[in-house]
Image (cartoon, rainbow, N blue to C red):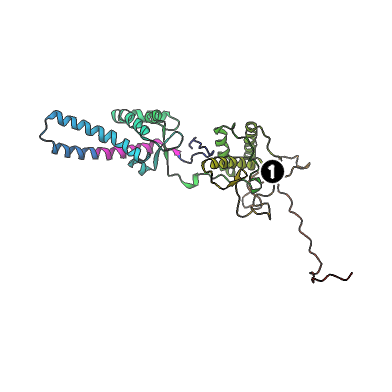
Amino acid sequence: MSELVTGEAVALELRPAKLPSRALAVLLDLAVAVIAYIVVTIGVVAATASLDEAAQTALSIAMFVLLLVGGPIAVETLSHGRSLGKLACGLRVVRDDGGPIRFRHALVRGLIGVIEILMTLGVVAVIASLVSARGRRLGDVFAGTLVVRERVPLARTGIVPPPPPWLAGRFSGLDLSAVPDGLWLAIRQYLTRMQQLDPQVGWSMAEQLAADLVARTGTPAPQGVPPAAYLAAVLQERQAREARRAFSHGSFEGGAPSVSGAGAGAGGPGPYGPPVVPTAAAAAPPTSPYRAEGDRSSAPYDAVRQPAAPQDAPSDDRPSTGFAPPA
């Protein structure tokens, strides 16, 4: 998976393209460029038959540079990294930070591509892609770009579960400036895959990540908050701050987005349950934050299930008639 992280602490879901798909996209682009070059060359030669051999040679070189070099550069610039071959294979060229490429990126990729693709028949590009951890060729390295996959199966993408409603706005005063991007990425990857992990392993990972986060923020985690819920709430807090910076008119209050829907009202603790209250009898290791298969009585972040609040006893008093008894 891509290691790029945006300012909202969200790792890009696009994955770096593999060598076979990139090679197929390059072959399609070259086939289109060669066909256009042959057609234009035949037309130019027929139109300039009266010129001498030197002029025809100059025109051939100019068309070669224009169609096989300038054409791909113009297409990638105007389409923001999606040539015909990449569009057919579901690929796209992006910057190292995940943003769309500009003319200078496409220019560097195109000029170096003439050497490593056209002049060496793709041998240099293949070797560079195999050596690179993210499959980048020399043009991508010098231009600061990356070819990623746009069409990713939904089953392979992860969604971060939202934190419990009772944690909304609780970490609005937390200092997150010292938390590195690598830790944010690890937290997000854990939250998207925690349901697939072994319960004990997942709990240990959550505790370790929570300890690392506490060490970076300098503020201890609140007692009674499960580590997975703590991680999700802090991650949501950072996303809310970045969203407020980008959209100053956003409806964010108290450091986190307002919670609506079931479980957000004042009538109950919501689907995640109330916070864990530590007691003297809770010396044993906490239970798993995962639900057993088929168990719908607790949420992913619940650690200890509290006893239900006692129900009000039925009253035997008769309804009031509206008249006060005589004194």
Which residue: 60% across, 44% down? 256
Q: Residue 203 falls in which quadrant of the image?
A: top right
Q: Which residue is mark 1?
A: 287
Amino acid type of the residue tagged 1 in the rendering: Thr
| Element under disc 1 | loop
Q: Position of residue 255 (x, y in %)?
A: 61, 43
Q: Name the one closer to the observer, 265 or 139.
A: 265
Q: Is residue 265 visible?
A: yes
* Depicted 58 relative to depicted 303: above or below: above
Start and end of the magenta stretch? Answer: 15-34
Location of the C terminus by quadrant is: bottom right
Q: Position of residue 156 (x, y in %)?
A: 49, 44
Indicate left or right for 326 with 179 as reference.
Answer: right
Q: How many marks?
A: 1
Q: Residue 207 falls in which quadrant of the image?
A: top right
Specify few, some or many for label 1: CA neighbours under 10 Å numbering under 14, 14-19, or 20 or more. some
Indicate left or right for 138 with 285 as reference.
Answer: left
Q: Position of residue 102 (x, y in %)?
A: 38, 35
Indicate left or right for 297 with 135 as reference.
Answer: right
Which residue: 88% across, 71% down? 326
